[in-house]
Amino acid sequence: MSDMIPFKDGKPSSLPSYIKEASIDSTNALVGGEASSFKRISIKGNVFRLIDGGEEVATNDERAMNVVIVDVADNTSRLYYSGSYKEGENSGPTCWSSDGVSPDDSVEEPQSVACASCPNNISSKDKGAACRYQHKIAVVFGDDLEGNVYAMNIPAKSLFGKAQGSSKMGMPLKAYAKYLSNAKLPIEAVVTEMRFDSNSPVPKLLFKAVGLVPEDNFGIVLRRKQETETKKAVGKMGSDEKKSAPEPVKVSKPKVDSKDQKLDDILDEFDN
């Protein structure tokens, strides 16, 4: 057997390419599962917080952040915590649903056979429903398309509702998606501004289109959409799928009516 590569000060001096390409699923299983390995963005306290391995590694005090949403979960999910849940606790939810229709098979204490008829789905005037909606998305920074993919859980207040005034002021995620759909724009092709709603007493994001991804970068975005970390971030990595990242896909160039066509010109047609 060849000689091992020794560690220096508890770590290798450099990571060989054959190691970089290997899966760390077994390592993460001991750390605490795949979820702990996610890089994600939290909006706790009206601050963009970058979380890596469950630890906060950086904050962005700006009220807005530009991202490209490279993928989204197929369905809006639901979470229910019995008792008084406190953010940051290690205990998981009591019941959950990946499709928002019925509890997942892995739930040990399902609260109902269907989410619609669940007693925890009934809203109160003061607190709303005990079972909360959220939608998983995966984003990259608008100025760093080749950088880290971050998972985000978009809560109900940032998910549902109407645009505030003009659509250019920003809107909840569902309304934003409908707006782009009317304009025949894939969300992956748009640089999206996420901005905290200054009128909300709790963290609430508004979404606004600020530009189109350049033609020569659109292939990067579509490749990032196919990567393993992106699929994991939005819950699309099934147990029967490969754990290694797929080969980059060959994509066709996006079609636009004019090279000089601007995002405002496209969206203004749908502003009303």
Image (spheres, rainbow, N blue to C red):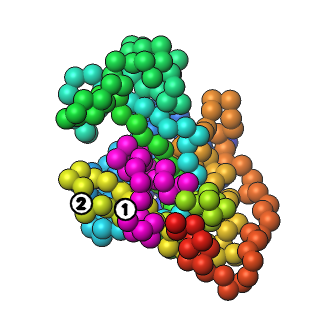
30 left or right of 247?
left
Residue under label 2? 199
Q: Secondary structure at mark 2?
A: loop
Instruction: Name the amino acid type tagged 1.
Output: Gln
- In-front residue for pair 73/204: 204
Q: Quadrant of the N terminus?
A: top right
- In-front residue for pair 200/8: 200
- The answer to whether residue 71 is visible is yes
Residue 166, image x and y in percent?
Answer: 42, 68
Is residue 152 positioned above or below 141 on the image?
Answer: above
Residue visible at 19% across and 35% down?
Answer: 126
Report crowding for label 1: few under 14, some 14 to 19, many 20 or more residues within 10 A (C-alpha).
few
266 left or right of 121?
right
- The answer to whether residue 149 is visible is no
Residue 223, by quadrant, is: bottom right
- In-front residue for pair 172/154: 172
64 left or right of 202?
right
Report crowding for label 2: few under 14, some 14 to 19, many 20 or more residues within 10 A (C-alpha).
few
Instruction: Name the amino acid type tagged 2.
Output: Asn
Residue under label 1? 164
Residue 234, by quadrant, is: top right
Q: Secondary structure at mark 1?
A: loop
- Circles 2 and 1, Cβ within 8 Å, touching? The answer is yes
Residue visible at 52% across and 52% down?
Answer: 138
Residue 151, image x and y in percent?
Answer: 47, 50
Is residue 62 positioned above or below 231 on the image?
Answer: below
The number of discs equals 2
Part of the protein shown in magenta: 152-178
Of marks 2 and 1, which one's residue comes earlier in the chain?
1
Residue 161 is a magenta residue? yes
